[in-house]
Amino acid sequence: MTSPDPVGADTARCAADHVTRRVPLAHPGDPAARVLDALRGGHFDSASTIVVVDGDRLVGLAPTERVLDADPDTPVGSLVAPGLPTVAPSTDQEQAAWQAVQHGVHTIAVVDRGEFVGLIPSEALLAILSAEHDEDMVRLGGFLNSKSTAQTTTLEPVLRRLWHRLPWLIVGLAGALLAAIVVGSFEATLADTVLIAFFVPGVVYLADAIGTQTEALVIRGLAVGVGIRRVAVREIVTGVLLGTILGTVAFLLVGVLWQDWRVALAVGVSLFAASSIATAVALVLPWLIDRMGRDPAFGSGPLATVLQDLLTVAIYLATATVLTR
């Protein structure tokens, strides 16, 4: 018999990994007294259930307490509890454990085409449920793969933290320098209409905020096994609607407060476009990083931010240049 990794496993394990055959076996015709005599002096991984077999074929399971209560001459086959579940060797360990929970039993038989393979005892079922619970909790916390991965990421030393984070931030620094070049290429537009520069931080911030919200949802979904296809359409539609609402509000506020409707239109149009694009970027990048086998919690934030900022600045300044000529 084996027990599950106490901190989870990177790959799913099956029922066959937890079986034991060191359990009391009996023929259906054996009297209860003989079965109990066989228990004395035996060494079993679990003796709470008598496995009733006819050759290799499983007849059923008879709880030991039922055998103790029966008359000595009662055939053990008549003491088999009805309706007890069985699982195949390839059944996922969590499904096997929940079968036992749902039927209120503390052991479960593993059967292959009617033949008895072994029994998963109560301590193994409890260990499976504990390990699966820990894994579910760390996935809900935004970590991928297993509790061991989450612990490694959280408790790793300073140099490893730097190694995981610094490359992505260097990419972000390069993006910031590139953004400065983009802004510099619109120097003439900014010199002619200084008001345009007032709204660069606001447009960039709102696009980043929308992208960050989408990114958080995607990473959380990937962590708990929700595929990108299940959220993509709804997130894109949400991004477009948010861009429409924010762009409309910004257009009205800028126009009323600064009395420059051309700049107001540039801000509104840019917010609509940048918000929609930021949502798409925030959807795709975590998915790509996850497909590469890397943790998107480290890379998608800096990379998505620099891409969103570059696109937002370029869209806003290009739109403002066209509309304020």
Image (spheres, grey):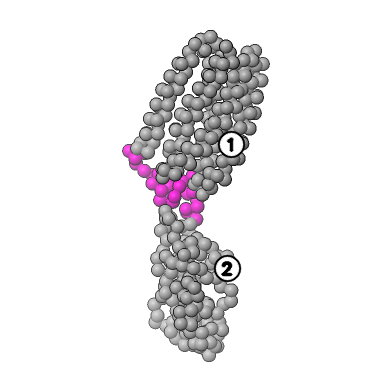
Q: Outermost residue toward the left?
A: 159
> Picture coordinates of residue 269 (x, y %)?
60, 23
Q: Nearer the viewer, residue 182 or 171?
A: 182
Q: Position of residue 263 (x, y in %)?
A: 60, 16
Q: Residue at x 32, y 38 (%)?
A: 159
Residue 222 place in picture, x, y as percent: 50, 45
Q: Which mark is residue 236?
A: 1
Provide the residue designation for mark 2. Answer: 103
Judge left or right: residue 40 versus residue 221. left
Magenta segment? 133-161
Using the numbered discs, state the Cα–Cα distance from disc 2 to disc 1 in whole angstroms: 43 Å
| Identity, as a three-letter code, of the amino acid under mark 1 | Ile
Q: Residue at x 50, y 26 (%)?
A: 311
Query: Does 294 sit above or below residue 260?
Result: below
Q: Please state if 296 lies on the left or on the right of 271 as rendered.
A: left
Residue 65 visible? The answer is no
Place residue 321 in its image quadrant: top right
Quarter of the image that includes the C terminus: top right
Q: Amino acid at mark 2?
A: His
Q: Main secondary structure of the magenta part?
A: helix
Q: Secondary structure at mark 2?
A: helix
Residue 135 x, y percent position in the rendering: 47, 53
In the depicted view, which residue is nearer to us: 249 or 178?
178
Query: How busy is the neighbourhood of tag 2: few (under 14 within 10 Å), some, or many (20 plus)?
Result: few
User: Is 159 part of what is drawn in magenta?
Assistant: yes
In this view of the protein, which residue sits in the foreground, 181 or 121?
181
Seen at 52% across and 79% down, the residue is 59
